Amino acid sequence: MSGVPTALAQNTSISHEAWGDLLETYVQQSKDGVNRVDYGALKANSADRTKLDNYIDQFAELSFDDLTRDEQFAAWANLYNAVTVQYIIGEYPLDSIKPWYSTGPWKKIKVEADGRELSLDAIEHDVLRVKWSDDPRLHYSINCASYGCPNLRREPWVAETLDEDLDAAARDYVNHPRGVTVRERGGLEVSSIYDWFQKDFGGSEASVIEHLLNYADDSLAADIRANNDIRGYEYDWSLNGTGK
């Protein structure tokens, strides 16, 4: 340790430019609407792996209290996504972040941020879902490296456009079959996200459907109203890599 007081060593701002460069380079928009990540190419590029590591290291002494509320949200969401990518390339090749026999690695994946050590699980459940408990759109901001998850954007979250970007992410997911599918036999099959976190979406099936209607396009909204009964939940844990 240098002996410099922690308060003097803290950063009061952070740039997401490096993360944006990596997203633009390695996240590909696919025709089926699911963004894929070229984890293999990133793992093979030592300079960009270092770029990712350096970006994440900035958060260790970042003073989140000195950021605006929207800046804090963008920072936490970007950090969660960047650390997830870092974990995947460290384990790559793999088929899923969550093998069938596992509860997942989120409590074990840890990072230094805001002057403390947190797991990905803590960032999601103890920070985002607590501080932004009134905004279920937070579930569209973080990506768990899975096909069933809301897309990893090709741009970082930033405070200046946060509200409109969260709305766009919600519309993107709700209007994709991963979010909502009308079953041939009637009723809806929706993402397990709306089951696991039903509390965040109002606490009932009716409130989940209301949320979906807020972001569904006209055609899907009509289908939801005609089939407003959730009959099943689905989630695909396979890796959202370019090989799928």
Image (cartoon, grey):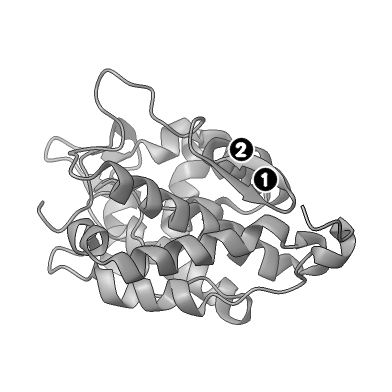
Q: Residue 128's spot in the image, x, y percent?
A: 63, 48
The mark nearer the N terminus, 2 or 1, is 2
Q: Residue 51's spot in the image, x, y percent?
A: 43, 69
Q: Residue at 75% x, 61% y: name it.
A: 64
Q: Is residue 27 visible?
A: yes
**Taking 135 as reference, is 212 left or right?**
left
Q: Residue at 26% x, 38% y: name it.
A: 189
Q: Which mark is residue 200?
A: none
Determine the residue located farthest toward the front in the rendered image.
2
- Tell me the kind of residue under disc 2: Ala
Q: Badge 2 is on which residue? A: 122
Q: Residue at 38% x, 78% y: name it.
A: 21
Is disc 2 in contact with disc 1, using a CB cutoff of under 8 Å?
Answer: yes
Q: As rendered, which of 60 and 1 lies closer to the eye?
A: 1
Q: As rendered, which of 35 and 231 lies closer to the eye?
A: 35
Q: Residues within 10 Å of mark 1 (few under 14, many from 20)?
A: some
Q: Badge 1 is on which residue? A: 127
- Tell me the kind of residue under disc 1: Val
Q: As rendered, which of 83 and 163 lies closer to the eye?
A: 83
Find the distance from the CA under tag 2 to the CA under tag 1. Answer: 7 Å
Badge 1 marks a residue whose secondary structure is helix
